[in-house]
Image: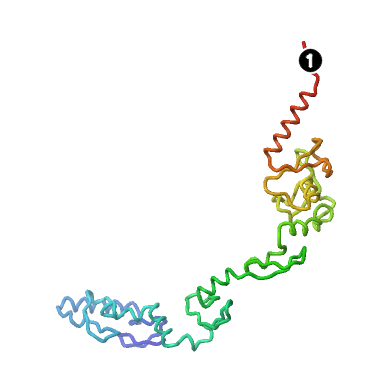
Amino acid sequence: MLKTCEICQETFETYRKEARYCGMKCVGEARRRGILAVREKSPEEAFMRICANCGKTFRVSKPSIQQKYCSTACSAPHSLPNARKALREIGFYHTQDHYRRTCQQCGTEFFDTARRGNRRFCSRECAGAARNTRVTLFCQSCGRPYTVKRYAVPISKFCSYDCTAAGYRLRTGPLSPKWSPGSRSRTGEGYIRIVAHWHPRASKSGHVSEHILVAEESLGRFLRRGEVVHHINGIKDDNRPENLMVLPSQSAHMRLHIAERRAMRLSKPSTVN
């Protein structure tokens, strides 16, 4: 924009609405004139301002203060929140298409006057109703309809835990889509591991113990939290279904091992010196 310097009266170009001088030289001259006015004891012209809201004359403490309003009451209507409120009252936003929104819950048209402009609902009631709205889906395992909340629609596939187990049961071992001939490996403890990235108990590398997969295939479900698979004959790589036993907890697993060791000690013939 083009403005006129108050000191040299020359026209200059600026992007600041409050600019009054064309350069630092004129700024220094303006300050010097204000100081001279104080020294000459004629402060009324240098210290007096006219309110931009009510038009009254008021006095400032220093000549260099660029104060536009005489009081808080006069400056409040020109603040950003109050200006938005005034624009809302006169219907300014209703004339702008880029403020127009459609509520995703009730379909009502509303005008978004917020600073970010990313509102999706017309009211708090619609936002709360959208969070609690349930959508009907069909289970990919049994085909029965079930309802879930709207946020779970992209990830929901099955209606229950049993249907989830049935849906993934055939994806274990060689039937898994991620199976490859080199997917089996042996740990240092002697257990066989298989690559199954989709499994809930998969490690960071995507491996799951084979005896867990075999036991789950026999049960028709995933192992619950805390359940442990026990090898009956004690051979860790013998993962036949008849050699595996599912125990409810690790403590039950340890009690079974202690009982087996005790039975082995009692079965050995005692040597008397």
Q: Quadrant of the N terminus?
A: bottom left
Q: Residues within 10 Å of mark 1 (few under 14, many from 20)?
A: few
Q: In the rendered view, tell whether residue 29 sits above or below residue 222.
A: below
Camera-side residue of 95 and 247: 247
Camera-side residue of 232 and 70: 232
Residue located beneath label 1 in the image: 271
**Quadrant of residue 6 within the rendered picture:** bottom left
Q: How is the image coloured?
A: rainbow
Secondary structure under the numbered disc 1 in the rendered image: loop
Camera-side residue of 73 and 148: 148
x and y, in percent, of residue 260 in the image: 76, 31
**Quadrant of residue 175 within the rendered picture:** bottom right
x and y, in percent, of residue 105 in the image: 58, 76
x and y, in percent, of residue 93 in the image: 47, 85
Q: Quadrant of the C terminus?
A: top right
For the residue marked with disc 1, what is the amino acid? Thr
Residue at horizontal 70 percent and vertical 43 percent from the top: 248
**Quadrant of residue 244 within the rendered picture:** top right
Q: What residue occupies the far left of the structure in this picture?
A: 41
Residue at horizontal 73 percent and vertical 42 percent from the top: 247
